[in-house]
Image (cartoon, grey):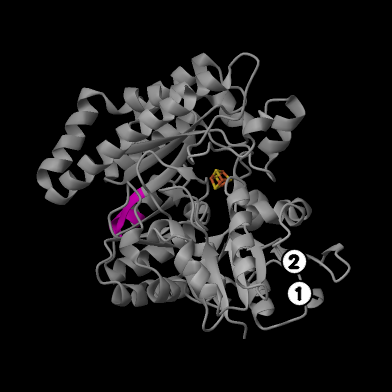
Amino acid sequence: MMKTLFLQPPSFDGFDGGAGSRYQARREIKSFWYPTWLAQPAAMVPGSRLIDAPPARMGMGPILEDVMNRDLVVIHTSTPSFANDVKVAEQLKAANPKLIIGFVGAKVAVQPTESLNGGAAIDFVARNEFDFTIKEIAEGRDFAEVDGISYRNAAGVIVHNKDRAVLEDMDQLPFVTDVYKRDLRIEDYFIGYLLHPYVSLYTGRGCKSRCTFCLWPQTVGGHRYRVRSPEHVAAEIRQAKIDFPQVREFFFDDDTFTDNLPRAEAIARELGKLGVTWSCNAKANVPRSTLKILKENGLRLLLVGYESGNQQILHNIKKGMLVTTAEQFTKDCHELGVKIHGTFILGLPGETRETIQETIEFATRINPHTIQVSLAAPYPGTALYKQALENGWLDVEHAELIDESGIQIAPLNYPHLGHAEIFANVEVFYKKFYFRAPKIAAIVGEMVVSPQMMVRRLREGMEFFQFLRERKQVAA
Ligand code: SF4
């Protein structure tokens, strides 16, 4: 077996762009997702190591030292971080010219030729789900025999091997939490709306919906929800409880954990027996009867992508959601005591000044516990990207989606609504949502009953205002 390093390279300070982040950018409050997509193959390669540099605040020094002893480095990349990741690969190759370097992630999955042409230090890229692909490469198989990779042959010609078969038996995947325990410090991982420390993992891949902006289902995950059995999930959580007694919450980061309701209920019942607090991603259409079962078995919070309060925009992005359904679902959650972190996107096709106001009013009316407001980001490989190119909406100078300090920019520009105005409205949205007397009272109430929450919210408040200041500088 090759001596293998799985690497999320160093990046901007506080850059949440790792192998578990759907939208790579610095957040308004410092946050880091687990590098689950890298931990999965790392769990299949004995003797490997996973370095997730940004949350560990690790610079290149220890990484260059580490690779002196390696045969293979697998780097997770993304559209925003690609240029930086190529520079890292060049440094690694200069330090150890014998290294084989492979890139994985949605960016190289959809742009294999461009990616290989963009970096001479890259020996191969993995196009599909890459768990078994990387295992075979680490076993020393000839590139020509490994499905799902693109690489340069001896003559320097780029070769695309046939696609890897989609993984159906998800229980074949070993536990990622074993790698977290071996290589990560779980206290380094923060998400503003999750209890700290938290642990996140996937119980399945793929999403049945076809939202035009959404990266993973259109690139690496697909539109069938392929799942692990409830027993396999419960076994991992049972072990993780022992390995991480300090964990306060488990998060299931499947695209849409509630895509299969009977299974979600079955897993919830297993989790109920284990007595853990948990949360997950959900679509805003979960029936009240299911919500009740989930809540009774430890569900604390749902992460819900509302995206917009305007029905036409929801149609335009193929969300498959009625505003009225989302309202009823949110009311049910409030009544059952399930907290919601609601996410919204400004600048989607059909956005106008009026729809922005409509979405802000919608958010304040349904009142999720916390919110996140993002800018529409056309990632290569998505229908939104294609649409943006065809219609001339994409500001090509900003196609990397972030600025030099890692802050998300508004790359979509409409004739009736410029990107500067879309960008400015993110701050307006946050202020209108949070600076209301009832919301302020609720936040203060939380802080009063919990000293830990007090410290955390004060820190987050400072980070939030700092973030807004930096955004203003970006816009200036
Ligand atoms: S429902 Fe959520 S995860 Fe599924 S495609 Fe839409 S945005 Fe993506």
Looking at the picture, how far across and down is residue 12, in whole percent? 46, 47
Nearest the viewer among 66 and 250 is 66
Crowd tier of the residue under label 1, counting other residues whose Cα lies within 10 Å: few below 14, some 14–19, many 20 or above: many
Q: Can residue 225 be seen in this view?
A: yes
Under circle 1, the secondary element is loop
Rendered image: mark on residue 146? 1
Looking at the picture, how far across and down is residue 364, in whole percent? 34, 26
Check disc 2 and report the residue beneath it.
Answer: 149
Q: Within 8 Å of ligand 1, the CB of disc 1?
A: no
154 in magenta? no
Looking at the picture, how far across and down is residue 120, in whole percent? 73, 59
Looking at the picture, how far across and down is residue 128, in whole percent? 69, 62
Answer whether labels 2 and 1 touch (C-beta < 8 Å): yes
Q: Which residue is drawn at 39% across and 25% down?
A: 427
Dividing the image into four equal quarters, which quarter contains ligand 1?
A: top right
- Mark 1: which amino acid? Val
Q: Quick check: 277 left or right of 418? A: left
298 in magenta? yes
Find residue 119 and report its image quarter: bottom right
- Mark 2: which amino acid? Ile
Rendered image: mark on residue 220? none
Crowd tier of the residue under label 2, counting other residues whose Cα lies within 10 Å: few below 14, some 14–19, many 20 or above: many
Nearest the viewer among 222 and 130 is 130
**Segment colored magenta:** 294-301
- Residue 184 drawn above or below residue 300: below
